[in-house]
Image (cartoon, helix red, strand yellow):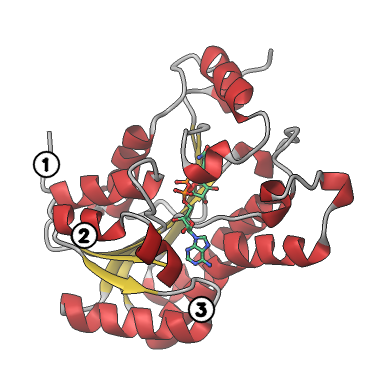
């Protein structure tokens, strides 16, 4: 049921690794709505993941970039504009990684090198991306930028570890850059706080399955899927949300408002 909501829109999607990735569904839905896309991920993720298959399916162009590397980001935004033929209308930041989670280091025993890396990959990369786009004047008037977040930015969840701190920082960056970028180029910047979703990053969190089930049971509408999230991103990227900015939007079937 596509409606051509993104016809003529040029977008960059960070973070599609495999079919389970939320960014994968977002890319599929944006392409179905008429968008022209650049898919980006780390060189290793492009080599070992399924990004090229997604590019074939969606007619997208793949450009490798490490989201923590400002030179890579400059090359990405420059090439993306050249290849798509103009300024960028929307960007999805769907990037996260924690070695503390991966290596089973609990919060109270954090390895600080890993902690810095978590913040750099999962939050500061958003600042670097926005800073680069701002400096290059790469985003169009009323462009829309969305980063994916999680309710652990506001509440404590056992097992979510240093990623909770990264999400709090991510949401703060969206607000603060939203102020700067809104005034200058009317660029909208929001975070979307998504339900637990079975993906590579999601299922690496210890206790994910029981939390997934609990959230699904507690949410009046049940957990939002990656496909639902993709529909929401389409709306946020479209021209129908031109005055929505600096918000953290819960997309969680009502879970965040439940008091029990
Ligand atoms: P995923 O594992 O499919 O996606 C994470 C992506 O980050 C991967 O494509 C990975 O290659 C990329 N990445 C890691 N380091 C990078 C770097 N240095 N440069 C560029 N890309 C890098 O998992 P998922 O769940 O789709 O995650 C996407 C976003 O959604 C993340 O921000 C995650 O925290 C968020 N989210 C996920 C939820 C879940 O339950 N799965 C719930 C709420 C938010």
Where residue 250 sits: x, y (%)? 51, 36
Residue 23: image x %, image y %?
37, 50
Label 2 packing within 10 angstroms: few (<14), some (14-19), many (20+) = some
For numbered disc 3, what is the local secondary structure?
helix
- Circle 1 — which element? loop
Marks 2 & 3, CB-CB < 8 Å contact: no
User: 138 or 121, which lies in front?
Assistant: 121
Q: Does 171 sit left or right of 182 as displayed?
A: right
Marks 1 and 3, the one that precedes in the sequence: 1
User: Is residue 137 visible in this depiction of the protein?
Assistant: no
The answer to whether any part of residue 181 appears in the image is yes
User: Viewer-proximal residue, 175 or 82?
Assistant: 82
Which residue is labeled 3 in the image? 131
Q: Quadrant of residue 116?
A: bottom right
Q: Earlier in the sequence, mark 1 or mark 2?
A: 1
Which of discs 2 and 3 lies nearer the camera? The answer is 2
Image location of residue 177, percent across then percent down = 54, 68
Residue 224: where, in percent of width, then height?
42, 28
Asked whether, in this view, residue 106 is left or right of residue 139, the answer is right
- How many angstroms separate mark 1 from mark 2 (CA)? 21 Å
Q: Which residue is mark 1?
A: 3
Residue positioned 75% across, 33% down in the render:
158
* Cβ atoms under marks 1 and 3 closer than 8 Å: no
Using the numbered discs, state the Cα–Cα distance from disc 1 to disc 3 in whole angstroms.
32 Å
Q: How many marks?
A: 3
Q: In the displayed structure, would residue 163 be above or below residue 48? A: above
The numbered dot on residue 55 is 2
Q: Is residue 255 above or below residue 23?
A: above
Q: Residue at x 64, y 39 (%)?
A: 205
Instruction: Looking at the image, tell me whether mark 2 or mark 3 is earlier in sequence order.
Output: 2
**SS class of the residue under badge 2?**
helix
**Does residue 195 appear left or right of residue 207 in this picture?**
left
């Amino acid at each position: 049921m596509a409606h051509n909501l993104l016809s003529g829109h040029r977008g960059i999607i960070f973070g599609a690794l495999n079919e389970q990735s939320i960014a994968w569904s977002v890319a599929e839905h944006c392409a179905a709505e008429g968008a022209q896309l650049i898919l980006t991920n780390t060189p290793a993720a492009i080599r070992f993941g399924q990004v090229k298959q997604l590019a074939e399916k969606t007619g997208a162009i793949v450009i490798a970039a490490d989201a923590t590397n400002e030179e890579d980001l400059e090359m990405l935004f420059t090439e993306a504009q050249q290849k798509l033929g103009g300024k960028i209308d929307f960007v999805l930041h769907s990037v996260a990684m924690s070695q503390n989670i991966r290596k089973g280091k609990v919060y109270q025993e954090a390895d600080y090198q890993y902690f810095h890396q978590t913040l750099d990959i999962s939050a500061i990369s958003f600042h670097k991306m926005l800073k680069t786009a701002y400096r290059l004047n790469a985003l169009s008037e009323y462009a829309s930028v969305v980063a994916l977040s999680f309710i652990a930015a506001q509440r404590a969840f056992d097992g979510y570890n240093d990623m909770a701190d990264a999400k709090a920082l991510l949401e703060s960056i969206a607000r603060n850059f939203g102020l700067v970028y809104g005034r200058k180029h009317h660029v909208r910047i929001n975070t979307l706080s998504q339900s637990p979703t079975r993906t590579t990053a999601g299922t690496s969190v210890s206790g994910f399955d029981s939390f997934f089930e609990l959230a699904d049971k507690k949410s009046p509408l049940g957990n939002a899927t990656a496909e639902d999230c993709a529909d929401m991103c389409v709306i946020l990227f479209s021209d129908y949300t031109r005055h929505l900015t600096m918000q953290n939007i819960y997309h969680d079937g009502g879970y965040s408002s439940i008091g029990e």
